Image: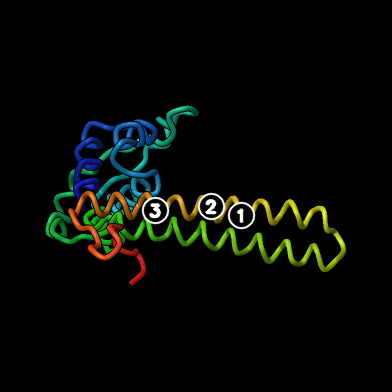
């Protein structure tokens, strides 16, 4: 069972409001994760008490201890959605992929602006095409600056400098 579901069940032993659960786990889990954990906890005896529902705090949950004891043998099982969430948190995206995505986006944006400017020029909107080309040049310059900064940072952090030109190695593989 997930730690999140287990902690919700512990909180529900004495009774707890839904919004209080969200507030407690807000720094650690998304609302979607908490909702899924609550739904999973219902299979272990978590139930709502309609008479104690509050307009601001939401549903009031309590743990049915008999149902919990009957389902205790399932405690070792982890639901598939929880396993996926744990794997996502355990494997963050490497910074190199993020940087490559950022550079690719900047390059694609400048290319898109060039295509848009060419289309505007063909339609007869030369002034707008000129502005578009200026924007494309700015985006390409930003891409080139980002690329060089990344190369320099990689060279400094790895201590690698190309002997031929004294420059950092290329990002292209």
Give the residue furthest to the front: 164
Q: Is residue 12 above or below residue 172?
A: above
- Mark 2–mark 1 distance (CA, rounded to whole Å): 6 Å
Instruction: Give me the C-alpha separation between circle 3 and circle 1.
Output: 16 Å
| SS at badge 1 | helix
Say whether marks 3 and 1 touch (CB < 8 Å). Answer: no
Reply above or below: 111 against 90: below
Q: Position of residue 149 (x, y in %)?
A: 37, 49
Q: Residue at x 25, y 54 (%)?
A: 155
Residue under label 1, please give it: 137
Where residue 115 appears, as percent x and y from the top left, is 68, 66
Query: Between disc 3 and disc 1, whose residue precedes?
Result: 1
Question: Which residue in the protein does label 2 denote?
Answer: 141
Label located before the other in sequence (2 or 3) = 2
- Quarter holding the C terminus is bottom left
Q: List the single residue furthest toward the bottom.
A: 173
Q: Position of residue 169 (x, y in %)?
A: 29, 62
Q: How is the image coloured?
A: rainbow
Give left or right: position of 30 versus 124: left
Mark 2 neighbour density, 10 Å: few (under 14) some (14–19) many (20 or more): some
Distance from the alpha carbon under mark 2 to that under mark 3: 11 Å
The quarter holding residue 119 reads bottom right
- Nearer-the-camera pick, 86 or 108: 108
- Quarter of the view holding residue 16: top left
Disc 3: which residue: 148
Which type of secondary structure does the marked residue at label 3 adopt? helix
Residue 66 at x, y percent in the picture:
18, 47
């Amino acid at each position: 069972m997930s730690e999140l579901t287990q902690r919700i069940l512990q909180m529900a032993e004495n009774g707890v409001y839904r919004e209080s659960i969200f507030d407690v786990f807000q720094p650690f889990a998304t609302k979607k994760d908490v909702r899924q954990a609550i739904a999973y906890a219902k299979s272990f005896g978590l139930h709502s008490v309609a008479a104690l529902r509050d307009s601001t705090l939401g549903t009031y949950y309590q743990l049915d201890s008999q149902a919990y004891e009957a389902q205790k043998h399932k405690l070792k099982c982890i639901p598939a959605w929880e396993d996926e969430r744990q794997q996502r948190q355990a494997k963050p995206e490497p910074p190199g992929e993020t940087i490559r995505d950022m550079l690719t986006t900047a390059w694609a944006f400048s290319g898109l602006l060039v295509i848009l400017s060419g289309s505007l020029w063909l339609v007869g909107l030369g002034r707008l095409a000129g502005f578009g080309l200026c924007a494309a040049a700015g985006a390409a310059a930003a891409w080139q600056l980002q690329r060089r900064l990344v190369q320099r940072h990689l060279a400094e952090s790895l201590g690698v400098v190309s002997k031929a030109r004294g420059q950092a190695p290329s990002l292209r593989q």
